[in-house]
Amino acid sequence: MGVLSQYIEKPVEEGGAGIATVQVSLIRPVSETVKPPRALWVPFPLGRPLGPPNRPDVQLDVLRRTLGLVNKTAGPVLEDYPDTLVEDTPPEEGWSCPVTFPSAEPTTGAEAAAAQLRTEAQLLRPWFDEGLRTRGRTTVGISGKGVDSIEEMVDILVRFAMDGSMAVPDGYAQSMPELLRLLTADVRAFYSEAAISKPGAGFPDPEALEEWFFLETAAGGVIYQVRERLLSADMLVLMAHVLDDDDIDSRLALLPGTAAAIGEGVVHKPGISRELLRETALAYQEGLIGRLTRSFVPIAMRDRHDERKKTTAGS
């Protein structure tokens, strides 16, 4: 955004729009490097640029201070949001999911895994409906279908994760494997919106919500498996193009040594269909290999799958 702001502020004769810009900064070192024309740094977590929930006084104050920067004619300007107002924000109560799921057990069959996810969805649905009633809106639906199709969505994810199925039921505009990204977004939105809808409960910070979803739900485990299957296809295509392990790690944004550690297993992994390999090869030709795979699991959770396995084994 900082670079875009600089472009927008350029005079019209230089290709810009000649319009003054302001922005909220969540990561101060980035703003210090990019030097946007006018920015207000706020000490809030990612995902909450205007401050904590249920604090309209703080949120409006952030907006007023940000918009007020437009009066600064000389830049770049990077101001800090005053700590005194942040300290006045009461601490949030502890958060916990309103539903207790049955203990997750390792599953090998698609039917068993799908049944586990359907159970989670059924337990969460009343809380999702409560949240929808309270908020009046939902972000579920970017796949082309709404919350009434959530069980179908998890079935598609499970069958790809377990068997590599590329089948797409009627009603979805997107094809595989791109559809997987949209389904994942809808499933995560459903779980998250349900989990935060218990009246009177504390509101979780984004990190706590991510950890709950990826480490404690069966759906989170399936999405890890979806990513692993897509990653295997990416690696096979790169191996076929004679990239060495270090190059593969770099191209796929993996930790150093990952390709060397899992490459042999990837070669012999079942369930990588010709159709998936073809789509992956096309992505390679377009310079987009790895883009889809990276969209499933947040960076902070990407290398924590082993924690989930240990938790499951100990439950």
Image (cartoon, helix red, strand yellow):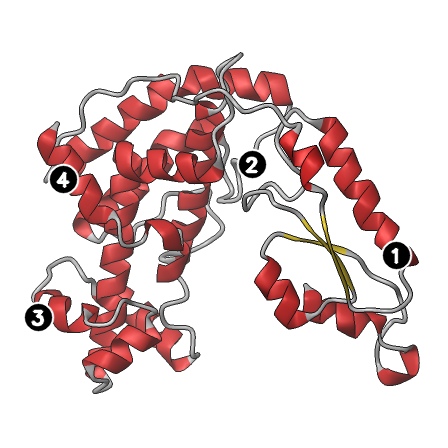
For marks 2 and 3 on the same chain, the one whose residue lies earlier in the sequence: 2
Identify the mark at residue 264; answer none if there is no mark. 3
For marks 2 and 4 on the same chain, the one whose residue lies earlier in the sequence: 2
Please, what is the three-letter code of the amino acid marked with disc 4?
Answer: Lys
Q: Is residue 36 above or below residue 174?
A: below
Q: Is residue 23 above or below residue 112?
A: below
**Residue drawn at point x = 29 percent, y = 17 percent:** 100
Please, what is the three-letter code of the amino acid marked with disc 2?
Answer: Thr
Q: Between residues 256 and 148, which one lies in front from this camera angle?
A: 256
To which residue does mark 1 refer?
70
For marks 4 and 1 on the same chain, the one whose residue lies earlier in the sequence: 1
State the separation of the CA atoms marked 1 and 2: 32 Å
Asked which secondary structure carries label 3, the reply is helix
For marks 1 and 2 on the same chain, the one whose residue lies earlier in the sequence: 1
**Rendering coords of residue 46 (x, y %):** 54, 46
Please, what is the three-letter code of the amino acid marked with disc 3?
Answer: Glu
**Residue drawn at point x = 60 percent, y = 41 percent:** 48
